[in-house]
Image (cartoon, rainbow, N blue to C red):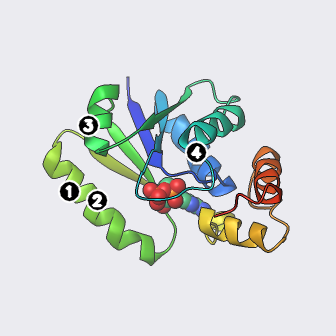
Amino acid sequence: MVRAIYPGSFDPVTNGHLDIIERSSRVADELIVGVLNNRAKSPLFSVEERVKILEEVTKKFSNVRIKSFTGLLVEFAKECEAHVIVRGLRAISDFEYELQMAQTNRIMSPNLDTMFLTTSLEYAYLSSTTVKEVAEFGGDISAFVPSLVEKRIKERISQGLKK
Ligand code: ADP
């Protein structure tokens, strides 16, 4: 039984993330999407909101669960009894950071490996930051995120809570 963790901020989840979730859920027996509660960042959506949104948009995948975590990823992986970490790679710019993280995590937890899935071409440009920027300027984000996320971002922006 292979249990994998796909960690990230998911602020908000994009179609690029969903593509990685769908593909890795086919490789792993069980996939836990780990939503990082990073107190240093001030997110558009709280960790509880991000968990709820992810639960909603991944409910069609029967072997995917959503959990939030704080602190070290290797500790969260231990808690979940996970065997592998999944990360997505877009451009070369992702590579350096991801390599460093994967190597650091493997020193700390030698039995925990990181598996990289390369982005699908149609999502190679897509990031949560870009989505937020486009939305803040009133642009159409329907090609980038699920409709639920589009709706939630619009509500958030119209409430004047954008950060
Ligand atoms: P983090 O803050 O940890 O980078 P993100 O939510 O931005 O979290 O991303 C989580 C993971 O998803 C990272 O491995 C990132 O490279 C990957 N990812 C993000 N967007 C895409 C995309 N469009 N295609 C493939 N992978 C992606």
| Percent position of residue 86, x then y | 42, 47
Disc 3 residue crowd, few under 14, some 14–19, many 20+, Cα 10 Å: some
Report the amino acid beneath label 2: Met
| Percent position of residue 68, x then y | 47, 36
**Residue at image mark 4:** 46
**Residue at image mark 1:** 104
Report the amino acid beneath label 4: Ser
Residue at the spot 75% in from the left edge and 49% down from the top edge = 149
Residues at badges 3 and 2 in contact (C-beta under 8 Å)? Answer: no
Residue at the spot 34% in from the left edge and 68% down from the top edge = 97
| Percent position of residue 8, x then y | 47, 50
Q: What element carries label 3?
A: helix
- The span from disc 3 to disc 1 (Cα, nearest Å) is 13 Å
Q: What element carries label 4?
A: loop
- The span from disc 4 to disc 2 (Cα, nearest Å) is 24 Å
Disc sitting over residue 101 in the figure: 2
Mark earlier in primary sequence (3, 1): 3
Screen quadrant of the N terminus = top left
Q: Is mark 1 within 8 Å of ligand 1?
A: no
Q: Nearer the viewer, residue 161 or 95?
A: 161
